[in-house]
Structure formats: structure tokens, C-alpha cells
Image: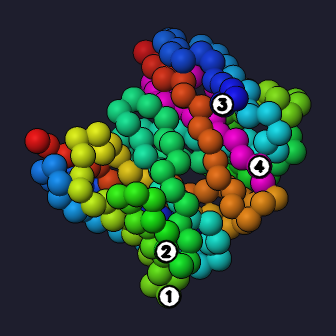
Amino acid sequence: DAGVIQSPRHEVTEMGQEVTLRCKPISGHNSLFWYRQTMMRGLELLIYFNNNVPIDDSGMPEDRFSAKMPNASFSTLKIQPSEPRDSAVYFCASSRTGMTKNIQYFGAGTRLSVL
Amino acid sequence: RKEVEQDPGPFNVPEGATVAFNCTYSNSASQSFFWYRQDCRKEPKLLMSVYSSGNEDGRFTAQLNRASQYISLLIRDSKLSDSATYLCASGEAGTALIFGKGTTLSVSS
């Protein structure tokens, strides 16, 4: 079975540019999560969706970050304009919420470098 | 603020050693608990769920102490391949998991 698929795997961009990260969750999963991981702050939840609806976006750093989930099989995380401090690994994860154990499965991540 | 705290380590142990990690969580409403393993430059992968009664999977044993709000992971007979970062996570039913920053384990020959 295909796992969570993220693209691109690596992104190098210049400060001020728009960056779009993409995620395809596991088929049948109804919750999707975006995380950011850095050495200093660890794995931070940015936003999550249940049934395509954003539930908690309190982790989104600021208005430069936005996320969408237009359908059950696709989500985007956009940073506009990007800044060097946005450099991190961004993970997408999905789960089948509604069950007692909300095990999350992670994609391989997008390694973002903003110069 | 809901937090999960772990000792970052690193824990440096020889092959065959037994090593234990602890993790504390602040949200008393948490109902789901997990240990994830993350290899260098890879994504976190589920190692095991943690149940109130404790659970064992081969050389790995996980336990939950609700009264003290901590979970533990015991690794027996450590292998070189166990070298990784171990993340604990907790969450309420139907919500996102909160992850600790991870504990780094290095097993040497």
C-alpha cells in the first residue's frame, strides 16, 4: 500500500519566494496533519484537518503560512513570502480518526532551505 | 500549554545493554500514547503503541503510568540497529498528537 506521499522531497529557494509543499494522505484516512521539525524546536504541529476541514491552526507561525485541503486526497502548505527562518523539514501525516487509537503515519518529508 | 517532555540524551550504550527512556506529558486528558522511532534524515515511524496494562514487542517494552503522567520504553539486548532517535507522543482521542523532542540512542560495538 502507498504511504503518505509528499513532494517535493527537497526545495531550495530564495528569501521572498513562494513555496508550495504538497501531500497525498493514505487512502481512507480522514485526518491530515502538517508538522515542522527543527533541531531547536523538535516536531511542531502546524495545522490539522478532519474530513478536509481545518480543525486547529494555532501552530501556524504567522500569516505567511497557509494550508488547504480541497479534497480527501490532497493538501498543500504554502509559505509566501518565505524567510530563512522557515528552513526546516516539513512532514505531512495522516490517520484514521474516529478510532480509539489515532496512529499517525508520516510522509518522507520536504527538506526546505530558504537562502 | 500541552507538552511532552523527554531527556534528549544522547544515551550511549554498548551492544547487549538494557536502556530505558522516560517521557512525561502534561495533558491529563490524553488517551493515546505512542513511541515513534526516527532515523537520521528520515520520517518518524511508529515503534509501538502504549497501553495502560503495558505491552511488549520482542526486546521492547512500553509502559504507561497515568497517575504520574509518564510513559516509558525499555529496550533489552540493544543492537547496533537500535541507534536512532525515539519520540514519545500523546494525544486526546480524535485530535493531533503532541510529540516530545526525542531521545537519541547510540549503540556501539
Subunit bearing disc 3: A
Disc 4 to disc 3, how far (Cα)?
Answer: 13 Å
Q: Which residues are magenta?
A: A77-97
| Above or below, comparing residue A30 to residue B73 in the picture | above
Q: Nearer the viewer, mark 2 or mark 1?
A: 2
Say which element carries label 1.
loop
User: Type of residue at label 4?
Assistant: Arg
Residue A112 placed where, x, y %?
50, 22
| Above or below, comparing residue A25 to residue B76 in the picture | above
Same chain for marks 4 and 1? no
Subunit bearing disc 2: B
User: Type of residue at label 2?
Assistant: Gly
Q: Residue furthest front?
A: B58
The residue under label 2 is B54
Disc 4 to disc 1, how far (Cα)?
Answer: 28 Å
Residue A95 highlighted magenta (yes or no): yes
Disc 2 to disc 1, how far (Cα)?
Answer: 14 Å
Residue A3: which disc?
3
Q: Does residue A49 appear in this view?
A: no
The image's colour scheme reads rainbow
Disc 3 to disc 1, how far (Cα)?
Answer: 36 Å
